[in-house]
Amino acid sequence: MMSTLVYAQEKQTQEKKPDKKFVVDENFLTTWKKVGHLTKEIRSFKTEKAVTVAGVRGTEATNEALRLLYFKGGVPYPSQLALKNAVDMLEAFVKENPKDSTVVECKFYIAQCSFQIGDNKKTITFYEDIVNNHPKSEYAALAKEELEKVKEK
């Protein structure tokens, strides 16, 4: 009797735990659209300067299939790989163009994507950078608010 009661309590506890493997953040989808536009601009700018190299069709097809797996509300939810690629691209852009007008925006999106990946250290670093080094930007207040949320978790 006692073991049945303990089993029932454990089962209830297990049922209440949310699945942390994949949780869709509706607000992040809007951010992801903006990241997509920004990285597309960066890519097209780099393409104009770079020599065209033949693409690998298999990789493109795989990425397209992954993109379709996480489709939510008309916006495909980014895979971990897409998020990491966006972070890498944005970081490279910030490093190469430190005085560009979109640097603060890029840093904000790096923090947002890093949070989705689960890299809280990088998230905090970029939010603090925005708050401390760009206090008059439109992203400073947002970064401060998001920073508090990240530190609470």
Image (tube, rainbow, N blue to C red):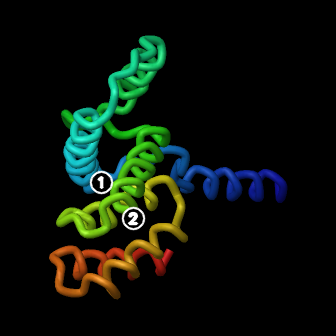
Q: Is residue 20 left or right of residue 133?
A: right
Q: Residue at x 17, y 66 (%)?
A: 101
* Number of the label disc, if any, that sits on residue 28: 1
Element class at badge 1 = helix
**Mark 2 packing: few (<14 Cα in 10 Å), some, or many (20+)?**
many
**Mark 1 packing: few (<14 Cα in 10 Å), some, or many (20+)?**
some
First in sequence: mark 2 vs mark 1: 1
Image quarter where the N terminus lies is: bottom right
* Number of the label disc, if any, that sits on residue 111: 2
**In this rendering, the label closer to the viewer, 2 or 1:** 2
Q: Amino acid at mark 2?
A: Ala
Q: Position of residue 104 (x, y in %)?
A: 26, 69
CA–CA distance in space, label 2 to label 1: 12 Å
Q: Position of residue 31 (x, y in %)?
A: 25, 54
Q: Quadrant of residue 65?
A: top left
Q: Is residue 7 above or below residue 64?
A: below
Q: Is residue 132 left or right of residue 19?
A: left
Q: Amino acid at mark 1?
A: Phe
Q: Position of residue 61 (x, y in %)?
A: 41, 15
Q: Is residue 86 above or below residue 66?
A: below
Q: Residue at x 50, y 74 (%)?
A: 153
Front position in the image: 117 or 99: 99
Front position in the image: 19 or 92: 92
Q: Is residue 56 above or below residue 86?
A: above
Front position in the image: 23 or 141: 141
Q: Is residue 126 left or right of residue 26?
A: right
Front position in the image: 22 or 111: 111
